[in-house]
Amino acid sequence: MRGKAGSTRRAFLATAALIGCVAWAGEAAQAKRPPLLICPAPVGDWRADIHDVQHVLTSAAAELWRFFPGRTLPPVIVAPQGGPITWHRRGLNGEFYVQLDTGHTFWSQYAYQFAHEFCHILCGYTDDEKANKWLEESLCELASLFALRRMAETWAKTPPYPNWRSFAPNHRTYAEDRIKKSQLPPGTTLAAWLKENEPAMRKEPCLRDKNNVVAAALLPLFEQQPEHWEAVAWLNAKPSREPRTLEAHLRLWRANCPEKHRAFVTEIAAQLGVSLPAE
């Protein structure tokens, strides 16, 4: 990157690394499981109070993080513009760098974008073969819908600030608007829809309209069994440079999961039209 964009990126890296080192060093020695640290970086133009931003981002992440009881993560450093993206490049102490594309007090938009990027982190995102990346992208869109709907419930009872309780329904509305636009055609199963659309998705994993259809279709499964969110931690356990079939990708995911999550991956596969062989 050159010019102003390059300068912003360099400032983000320098500032974010400093924040991450200080926050992580101060917390790691004080608890068995260090708290999840989401740190908005003082770069770019948030056009909002940075402490309010931190509450929103932490709230969105918490709706997923609660299902990863044995996991720890380095700090996640977040900038307001230039994305949404999670960089493959990490900080000196392992910090994750995330850039959003939002600002002001659009709290539901913050939550929607950040939950997606946080899910990439939980999935152990890798820079490997792209043929099945559409599945990760779809799960991350699902994470956004899931987090927003859960935040609507959480903020109705225990919002970050008491006067934010009235904002809780907005999170649900934001999610529902996207779900309504992402319904399968009447009488069509996800498996049938995917048979027609997967070839395009294997070429370009970030076809958001298509990712959202998969996300909306799988959302009930994750809402009914949220304890299996942890399964995504093994989605990229066996990276490869060579393209794999969807069946092979799902089979490896299931094989690398702890046994308690394997039946859930089998359910996901079935909805995608893939019948995994019995173990």
Image: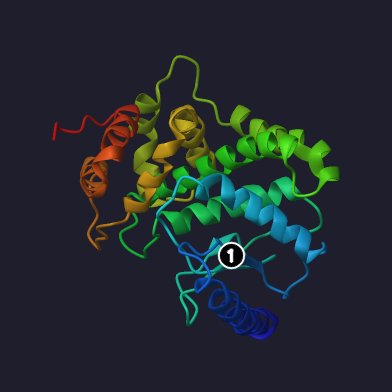
Quadrant where the N terminus is found in the figure: bottom right
Q: Nearer the viewer, residue 215 or 118?
A: 118
Question: Taking 107 as reference, is 261 above or below it?
Answer: above
- To which residue does mark 1 refer? 37
Q: Position of residue 9 (x, y in %)?
A: 62, 79
Question: Taking 190 as reference, is 140 above or below it?
Answer: below
Q: Residue at x 46, y 35 (%)?
A: 226
In the rendered structure, the answer to whether residue 259 lies left or right of residue 154 reads: left
Q: Quadrant of residue 7?
A: bottom right
Q: Residue at x 63, y 35 (%)?
A: 149
Q: Position of residue 86 (x, y in %)?
A: 52, 64
Q: Position of residue 126 (x, y in %)?
A: 37, 63
Quadrant where the C terminus is found in the figure: top left
Question: Taking 142 as reference, is 204 above or below it?
Answer: below
Q: Residue at x 59, y 42 (%)?
A: 147
- The colour scheme is rainbow
Q: How many marks?
A: 1
Q: Residue at x 66, y 83 (%)?
A: 11
Residue farthest along the top direction in this orientation:
187
In the rendered structure, the answer to whether residue 274 lies left or right of residue 223 reads: left
* Residue 82 visible to the viewer: no
In the rendered structure, the answer to whether residue 165 lies left or right of residue 146 reads: right
Q: Callout 1 environment at 10 Å: few (<14), some (14 to 19), or many (20+)?
A: many
- Disc 1 element: loop
Q: Nearer the viewer, residue 114 or 82?
A: 114
Q: Position of residue 207 (x, y in %)?
A: 49, 46
Q: Amino acid at mark 1?
A: Leu
* Residue 116 visible to the viewer: yes
